[in-house]
């Protein structure tokens, strides 16, 4: 099989064995996406994806004239070791910024491959006569531009998600004009680059194109507020796919085209689904995001001091034991405290006492798509007990207790009632309809990531449990007989 693949690299036509290998890799990538669509099949989906990537990489190495296979092998080993080390050590709370960081590497790789193809077009088979073909230049320019946008945008997303940069929107004067002007310049430079000939003409154009693309990635993400970060992560994932696809066309690599198109389209679909879940248009998120309007109140502190009820773990345990139905709403605070295992233990004890326990997951809970689902799966929470917003929101009226642990914006009724709120229009859980609400948060001094106060804190049926989420749940577990 390997000899057939290698022989195909020397022939003028496309080796059918190479086409079959890339087709098999593409099918495995599709199966991977299908598997990742459900927690119960996600492990198998990951395995399909790894197998598909192994086939694609091995096929590419065999069918191309590799200058030094030892150096490439060492690079793969070093990169794989770094990835393995990071994956083993990274905390689940850091997963969103890790994903953003990895997206930046994909974007940077596309930029570097594009520049390598420009500087040595003969090695990539791009020469038409003595110069690079116009179509190849367009593909190259698009790949570099999308890759650069992905890189700089992902760096800003990483900084915001990791707390190294404020999650509040950073609004530049005339930002929309600047962004549109920069995008228009990128399109113009790509066209000029395609029509130019010779290094003297093309070099200044490709440099300007790269710089402008790096700049627009930065400019697009800094005005986006924290509440929109899950969409940003999904959007950057889509960008990284399109960058890979563009480079696939440049290199004539079918596997890159297939993989890039799958990642790009799936990321775009996910971004659209999440924007629908927030009742936002994709364009409005990219243009500014939650909290990006001038004058919006998003200071990160409560707007006023109002009376609230504070309870203890013993109080909560007693009322939970008396309940017939409890709905748990997890959020980023649960992830920070690593309280998912204690929460599972509490739910198990309640179920032993005949209490019905369900988990409600908002599409944008946490800092990335599926963040809460992953944490609950890590704690071995049964998949059949986990429900999306549209499937469980109507059940709060019949719930005895809405148990909110670390969530805020996704249960804030201001999204439904306050047209001046930065989160107005985002579908939220109707926790105010539950007979009793337990709200775990560290203190009353802060608010959610979107910087908006929450009326649920002050409702008559709300009991605030002010403590570290894991510590509070563990105390509740101890108090349950």
Image: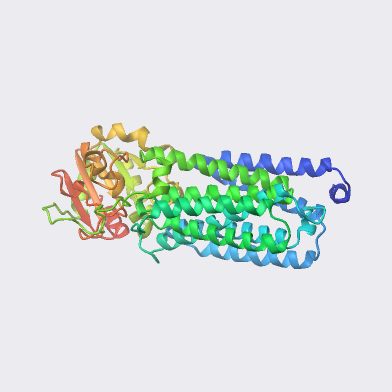
Q: 416 above or below 298?
A: above
User: Left or right: 238 with respect to 198?
Assistant: left
Residue positioned 71% across, 59% down in the render: 118
Pinpoint residue 162: horizontal percent, then vertical percent: 42, 63
Q: 155 above or below 129?
A: below
User: Left or right: 321 with respect to 233?
Assistant: left
Residue farthest along the left direction in this orientation:
307
Residue positioned 33% across, 56% down in the render: 333
Residue positioned 59% across, 54% down in the render: 189
Nearest the viewer among 48 and 260 is 260
User: Left or right: 173 with respect to 439?
Assistant: right
Nearest the viewer among 374 and 290 is 290
Pinpoint residue 3: horizontal percent, then vertical percent: 88, 50
Quadrant in the picture for residue 61? bottom right
Pinpoint residue 111: horizontal percent, then vertical percent: 62, 59
Q: How is the image coloured?
A: rainbow
Whether residue 367 can be seen here: no
Quadrant in the picture for residue 324? top left
Pinpoint residue 384: horizontal percent, then vertical percent: 43, 37
Nearest the viewer among 134 and 9 is 134
Nearest the viewer among 416 and 13 is 13
């Amino acid at each position: 099989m390997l000899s057939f693949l290698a022989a195909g690299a020397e022939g003028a036509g496309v080796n059918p064995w190479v086409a079959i290998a890339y087709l098999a890799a593409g099918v495995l990538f599709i199966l991977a996406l299908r598997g990742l669509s459900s927690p119960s099949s996600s492990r198998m989906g990951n395995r399909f994806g790894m197998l598909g990537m192994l086939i694609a990489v091995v096929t590419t190495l065999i069918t191309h004239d590799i200058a030094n296979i030892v150096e490439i092998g060492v690079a793969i080993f070093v990169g794989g070791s770094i990835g393995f080390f990071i994956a083993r050590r990274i905390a689940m709370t850091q997963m969103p910024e890790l994903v953003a960081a990895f997206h930046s590497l994909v974007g940077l790789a596309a930029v570097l491959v594009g520049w390598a193809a420009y500087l040595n077009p003969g090695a990539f088979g791009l020469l038409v006569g003595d110069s690079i073909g116009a179509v190849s230049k367009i593909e190259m320019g698009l790949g570099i531009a999308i890759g650069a946008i992905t890189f700089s945008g992902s760096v800003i997303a990483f900084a915001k998600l990791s707390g190294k940069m404020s999650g509040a929107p950073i609004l530049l004067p005339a930002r929309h004009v600047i962004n549109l002007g920069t995008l228009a310049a990128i399109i113009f430079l790509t066209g000029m680059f395609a029509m130019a000939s010779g290094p003297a003409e093309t070099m200044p154009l490709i440099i300007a194109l790269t710089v402008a693309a790096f700049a627009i990635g930065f400019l697009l993400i800094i005005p986006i507020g924290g509440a929109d970060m899950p969409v940003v992560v999904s959007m950057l994932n889509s960008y990284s796919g399109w960058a890979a696809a563009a480079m696939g066309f440049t290199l004539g690599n079918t596997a890159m085209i297939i993989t890039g198109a799958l990642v790009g389209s799936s990321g775009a679909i996910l971004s659209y689904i999440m924007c629908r879940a927030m009742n936002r248009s994709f364009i409005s998120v990219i243009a500014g995001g939650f909290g990006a309007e001038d004058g919006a109140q998003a200071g990160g502190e409560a707007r006023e001091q109002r009376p609230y009820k504070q309870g203890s773990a013993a109080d909560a345990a007693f009322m939970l034991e008396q309940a017939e139905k409890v709905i748990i709403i997890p959020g980023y605070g649960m992830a920070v405290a690593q309280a998912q295992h204690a929460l599972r233990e509490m739910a198990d004890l309640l179920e032993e006492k005949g209490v019905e326990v369900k988990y409600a997951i908002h599409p944008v809970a946490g800092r990335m798509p599926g963040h809460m689902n992953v944490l609950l799966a890590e704690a071995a929470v049964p998949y059949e007990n986990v429900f999306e917003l549209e499937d469980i929101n109507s059940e709060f009226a019949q719930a005895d207790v809405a148990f909110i642990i670390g969530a805020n914006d996704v249960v804030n009724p201001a999204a439904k009632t306050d047209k001046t709120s930065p989160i107005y229009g985002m579908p939220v859980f109707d926790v105010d309809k539950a007979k009793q609400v337990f709200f775990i948060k560290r203190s009353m001094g802060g608010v959610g990531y979107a910087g908006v106060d929450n009326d649920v804190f002050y409702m008559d049926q709300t009991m605030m449990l002010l403590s570290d989420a894991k510590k509070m749940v563990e105390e509740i577990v101890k108090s349950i007989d």
